[in-house]
């Protein structure tokens, strides 16, 4: 449990070091790189790589959290990523589209921005509770 709290604290502190404006610029670089070569190459530019790594890392962190929550009977259900070869590009595109609808310098953590983007783009089909 202590290890989990330490990891969460490290993630929270590091998430604030990366601003929404920087994330937007980096994801735009990834989008531009994809437009040039029709594939998402994290080595095309440092900015593109940082966006891809952040978004994929966020998704991996969520998957681990979902797995751990499920092991104690809790369903997070914040977003459900589809399978597919182009998932990295789709996640980057979802984040970029979400950031383009935000103010020029969005407040809040980049983690919150990415979570909002992924939950809007990849909602889960299964509701947590049945509608009455």
Image: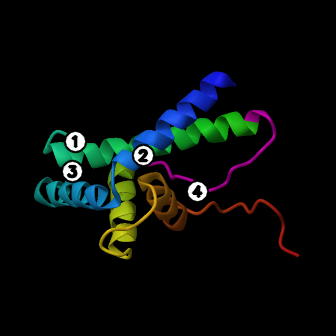
Question: Does the stretch in magenta take in 100?
Answer: no
Q: Residues within 10 Å of mark 2 (few under 14, many from 20)?
A: some
Q: Position of residue 126 (x, y in %)?
A: 71, 60
Highlighted magenta segment, given as a residue range: 71-84
Can residue 55 be spotted in the picture?
no
* Number of the front mark, 3 or 4: 4
Measure the alpha-carbon separation of dots 4 and 2: 19 Å
Residue identifier under label 4? 79
Nearest to N terminus: mark 2 or mark 3: 2
How far is disc 4 from disc 1 in space, using C-alphas? 24 Å
Residue 88 sits above or below residue 28 on the image: above
Q: Is residue 33 left or right of residue 24?
A: left
- Judged by its main secondary structure, the magenta piece is loop
Between marks 1 and 3, how big is the CA–CA gap? Answer: 10 Å
Residues at marks 3 and 4, CA–CA distance in whole angstroms: 24 Å
Sequence-first tag of 4 and 2: 2
Distance, label 1 to label 2, CA atoms, is 20 Å
* Circle 4 crowding by C-alpha within 10 Å: few under 14, some 14–19, many from 20: many
Q: In the image, which disc is placed on residue 42?
A: 1
Distance CA(mark 2)–CA(mark 3): 27 Å
Secondary structure at numbered mark 1: loop
Q: Give whichever of discs 3 and 4 has the lower sequence position.
A: 3
Residue position marked by numbered label 3 in the rendering: 39
- Between 126 and 64, which is closer to the camera in this rendering? 64
Q: Position of residue 113 (x, y in %)?
A: 45, 60
The residue carrying pointer 1 sits among few (fewer than 14), some (14 to 19) or many (20 or more) residues within 10 Å by Cα, namely some
């Amino acid at each position: 449990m202590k290890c989990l709290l330490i990891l969460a604290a490290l993630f929270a502190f590091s998430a604030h070091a990366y601003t929404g404006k920087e994330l937007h610029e980096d994801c735009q670089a990834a989008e531009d790189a994809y437009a040039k070569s029709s594939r998402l190459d994290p080595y095309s530019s440092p900015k593109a790589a940082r966006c891809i790594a952040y978004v994929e890392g966020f998704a991996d962190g969520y998957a681990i959290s979902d797995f751990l929550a499920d092991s104690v009977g809790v369903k997070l259900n914040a977003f459900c990523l589809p399978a597919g070869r182009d998932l990295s590009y789709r996640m980057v595109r979802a984040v970029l589209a979400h950031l383009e609808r935000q103010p020029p310098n969005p407040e809040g953590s980049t983690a919150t921005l990415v979570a909002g983007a992924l939950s809007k783009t990849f909602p889960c089909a299964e509701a947590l509770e049945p509608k009455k």
